[in-house]
Image: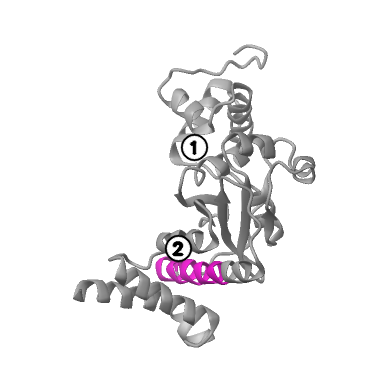
Amino acid sequence: MRNRRSQNREALTRVSTIRDEWGENSSLGRLWAMLTALAEERDRTPSVEFVCEVAAERFGTESACLIVTGPTGIAELHSSIGKLGHRIPEIEVMVGEGPIRDALELASTVLVTNLDAQPVLRRWPLFAPLAAEAGARACFAFPLAVGVVRAGVLVLLHDATLAPGAAALREALVFADLILAMLMGDQVARQGKAPGPAQDEFPIVGPEVHQATGMVAAQLDTDLDTAFARLRARAFADERPLSEVAADVVARRLRFDPDPDIR
């Protein structure tokens, strides 16, 4: 018990802006108090991952993921929850469009209550059908942003259509603000500076995809951007997750030919 309380105090120190700048009686302060109590009840640490998990629970979604901007300003998958939490961001990388990308680039909340709706299909003609095929029916992306700082996106995903009420949306925005404060506190503690403006690039990929991109660049004798585009195109054409295609490249089961007509 003593160790758990010590961890909670350390976590509170990392997000001291909640207490010092917004006050313990603010919406952020009240949410943090609820989360620390819940974490202790569940014998968990009130980490960013735990906050995302509770956000999904309270919003009524079965999956979630957190996209963060790394030290270079490029988006990365920080954590994922549920069966859709990893697959949906990967689809966005593969096709180059979707609600997560829009939320990050525009620093604006994107609410998709039904991925099969015609306006959604027109807005993201490549992403929407593939996301629905993967099992997603609703997607809600809340940017973690203040001013020019864009720290990432909190994404809540569900396998059925979902129309949240105003209270649920308000609370989700507070969750996003809390995660932003936690991420900024962690980054300042590690690097001495807060996250900066997001870059134009949007590769939410893991280390294996980075490695595969380098191998494809060598095989094609080309730059990394072109190699990554070819890797994405292959995954899209084969209707396979990008991570699977990357794994085949790294394992040398798949090789790219310089001629784009030869596979």
- From this view, report whether residue 260 is shown above or below residue 202: above
Mark 1 or 2: the one toward you? 2
Q: In which quarter of the image is residue 14?
A: bottom left
Of residues 10 and 176, the one nearer the viewer is: 176
Please identify the quadrant where the C terminus is shown: top right
- From this view, report whether residue 58 is shown above or below residue 101: below
User: Which secondary structure lies at badge 2?
Assistant: helix
Residue drawn at x 66%, y 36% is 95
Instruction: Name the residue that disc number 1 marks.
Output: 210
Q: Distance between the residues labelled 1 and 2?
A: 31 Å
Q: Quadrant of residue 121?
A: top right
User: Farthest residue in the top direction?
Assistant: 262
N-terminal of the pair, mark 1 or mark 2, is 2
**In the shown orientation, is residue 233 left or right of residue 52?**
right
- Residue contact at pointers 1 and 2, CB within 8 angstroms: no
User: Which secondary structure lies at badge 1?
Assistant: helix
**In the shown orientation, is residue 42 left or right of residue 20?**
left
Instruction: Name the residue that disc number 2 marks.
Output: 54
| Residue 177 lies in the magenta stretch | yes
In the rendered image, residue 72, in percent from the top left (x then y), is placed at: 54, 54
**In the shown orientation, is residue 191 left or right of residue 59?**
left
Which residue range is magenta in the image? 174-191
The mark found on residue 89 in the picture is: none
Residue drawn at x 68%, y 56% is 111
In the rendered image, residue 183, in percent from the top left (x then y), is placed at: 48, 66
